[in-house]
Amino acid sequence: MDLQPAPDDVVWDLPGDPPHRTALLVLPHSGGNAHGYAPWRDRLPGHVRLLVGQYPGRGARFGEPLPRDMTDLVGPVLDCLPSGVEDLVVLGHSMGSLVAYETALALTLAGRPPRALIVSACRAPFLPNPSPVVPAALDDDALVAAIRQRGGTDNAILDEPELRELVLPSIRADFAIDDDYRRATAPRLTCPVLVLGGESDPVVPAGALARWAEVTTGPVTTRVLPGGHFYFQDRLDTFLALVTGVLDAVPTASV
């Protein structure tokens, strides 16, 4: 019998100080995990409930089969969202933006649209990947070189053979999903969308970000910050100030 992951293994719930006005659901990048985003709890306002997705093959979900497609990433997150979360903003970075979009789309189709969607350093979902990795064609050393070029992964992990052996399978799986994913048609979202990116991002050129305006009937705002694909790591306060602006601005049902 297959064992199902515990809900709090799939979606970390970091509540802060009640009462909560809004919940922020964060979906990690390719190869990312909930551990990397949990410290945002201390940088966000106390009234924000922070939820962070954990994908299969990492953390407490390490023993699960690796994800094969977008459904394997999105489905468990949807199933494990805490009950009573009405005022939800969904955020993703890089591949996580596609997971965030699919999550927002599923919630919208279910009659529970998020209050806003925030996407970062990612192409619009109907576009092909402008910088595919093709991990199946790369040996471990070549894959590590591709990871280093993009940034976002601690070099100490990549330099340590035992740690590298643990993380590379999930990174391979995520890159393959990111390479292949493309949603040609879908109903438009209804929520506002904030689109963020790095002005010198070699993976997703800043000029491509404008196409996100085509996924929603709501207002779309685009902001480009200095930096590359992981531009926010060096400007986290600025980045989270933009995120907090969305969290504070959207209408809520609980107030």
Image (cartoon, helix red, strand yellow):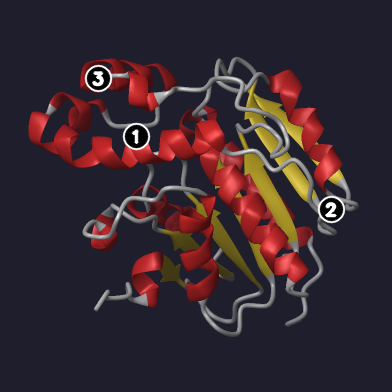
Q: Residue furthest front?
A: 1
Query: 229 and 17: which one is in front?
Result: 229
Mark 2 or 3, closer to the camera? 3
The alpha-carbon separation of the residues under discs 1 and 2 comes to: 31 Å
Dot 3 or dot 1: first in sequence order is 3
Question: What amino acid does circle 3 point to?
Answer: Asp
Q: Under tag 3, what secondary structure? A: loop
Q: Is residue 63 above or below residue 137?
A: below
Q: Earlier in the sequence, mark 1 or mark 2?
A: 1
From mark 2 to mark 3, how far is it between C-alphas? 39 Å
Image location (x, y in percent) of residue 139: 25, 19
In the displayed structure, 103 sits above or below 195; it is below
Quadrant housing residue 227: top right
Residue 119 in picture, x, y percent from top left: 65, 43
Q: Which mark is residue 172?
A: 1
Where, quadrant-wise, is the N terminus in this rendering? bottom left
Q: Secondary structure at mark 1?
A: helix
- Quadrant for the C terminus, please: bottom right
The residue located at (39%, 75%) in the rendering is 7
